[in-house]
Amino acid sequence: MKTLLEKILEVCDHAEVYSRDVFSTSVSVQAGEIQGIESEKKTEVAIRITKGDKMGAAVATSLDDETIIERALISLENQKSEAVDFPNEKVENVICASDRVKNMGTQELVKLTFDVSDRLKAIASDITSGVELIKTIKNVKMINSSGFESEYDYTNIAAVIYTLNEQGFYSTIKEYSSSDVPMIQDKQLEKMIELHRLGNQMVTLENEKMPVVFSGNVMGSLMLRVLGGVNGGNVSKGISPVGEKLGQKLFSDKITVRDDATMPLGCNSYAFDDEGTPAQNTVIYESGVLKSFLVSCGQSKKIGMKPTGNAQKRTLFSKEIEDSPSVFDTNIIIEGHSVPDEAIIGGIKRGLFITGVMGAHTGNINQGDFSMNISSGFLIENGKMVGKVKGAMIAGNIYDLFQKVEAIGTEKEVMRSIFYTMGYSPMVLFSEVNIVGK
């Protein structure tokens, strides 16, 4: 990497070299039979160069491919990307890799997949279920002309467990993701089966307002909108609804939201972001009060805040080496006024428990609006779930909704941001939500 950096600096003012080696293996089992075993191994290289006030970038599949320099120069001359300062800060140790996962062979991954599949079958032999485990091992290295040079290892085991209804469609889905092997308990599998069987009892709702519990997984669809407001890019452009509201209480005091890239063995933990800024634990909302935005190097000077270590090579729908570093979540953690899950459900006279939505990417995300179909939701009456809701939607704005947080559950689930995991949240109870029914 040093040799490539030296050659790049012969033709530009400043430069950065980023490389990552990625190896992944997935095992899929359905109804007790293997559906597929797939593996992928790749090396990816990206450089960014600056000359004057311009920036250029290019990618390759090898550090030996020196044509990347010429392509970066062409990019610099033909694209309108502003130059940024490359950071050089000390990187602290972050536990984002597990030796067990590093040393795990395909046979052990298959064994783990069948272990979960067999336990599901033992709980409910009459229900068709499936399990997919995906193992990822990654090494990331970066060096720049400011003197920064560091690397880290990352591992991840992601699990997707599901049941199918009689028509062959998904009925219930449970996800896990961490740098280590996730702990999948029988009681969690039993809860999946309970919800699956409730799917046979269909209920409809009218247009009404009621208490709603969002499962930890589904909280990701709401957090997309929260993050749109605190994204440094939106703040710097003046399109964030909270850009001028630092220090103000905008949510219920029963909820705190933070972004923690330093979380040991978290699903998205790392030592530094894709610009070289060290990982941080950033409190975004503390007891409802807006405390910070998430900021990249390019946005730092514009809004007068230090970078928060959230710049990543990704977009809303992809995580490719070609993607320019943009501000995204790492491990979003939702915490606050904690109440046992059973007590939350048991204390609702009439309400809704939502475990799946469709349309999370639609609407004005940055302004906080949402209008989503309930793909999996269960009516609660007198503290018990009585049936699966058919043909209903939820609609509103998160800046109204998050003022109505009543309680935070205790069992954390991995949150999903459309295609990607975005951290962990327990179930969250909102006192009142607009339901669009039959």
Image: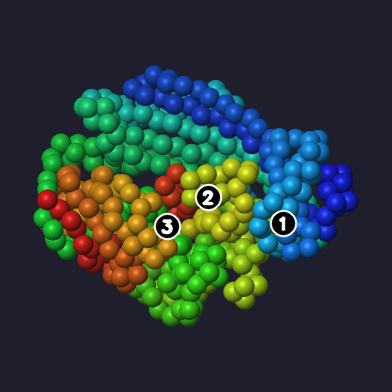
Q: Earlier in the sequence, mark 2 or mark 3?
A: 3
Q: Is residue 42 above or below residue 144?
A: above
Image point (71%, 49%), residue name: 75
- The percent position of residue 109, horizontal first and vertical second, equals 52, 28
Q: Position of residue 334 (x, y in %)?
A: 42, 61
Q: Nearer the viewer, residue 49 or 430?
A: 49
| Residue sitting nearer the eye, 348 or 206 | 206
Mark 3 Cα-neighbour bin, 10 Å: few <14, some 14–19, many ≥20:
many
In this orientation, does residue 405 appear? no
Residue that extends furthest to the top in the rendered view of this protein: 33
Say which element carries label 3. helix
Disc on res. 224: 3
Q: Is residue 157 visible?
A: yes
Q: Find residue 315 and name its label.
A: 2
Give the CA separation, mark 2 to mark 3: 13 Å
Foreground residue among 121 and 334: 334
Q: Is residue 73 left or right of residue 394?
A: right
Q: Check contact, mark 3 vs mark 1: CB within 8 A.
A: no
Alpha-carbon neighbours of circle 1 within 10 Å: few (<14), some, or many (≥20)?
many
User: Which comes sooner in the sequence, label 2 or label 1?
Assistant: 1
Amino acid at circle 1: Met
411 or 84: which is nearer to us?
A: 84
Q: Is residue 386 left or right of residue 426?
A: left
| Residue type at numbered disc 2 | Thr
Q: Which mark is residue 55?
A: 1
Residue located at (25% from left, 45% from top): 376
Choose mark 3 or mark 1, whichever is in front: 1
- Give percent across and percent down for residue 433: 23, 63
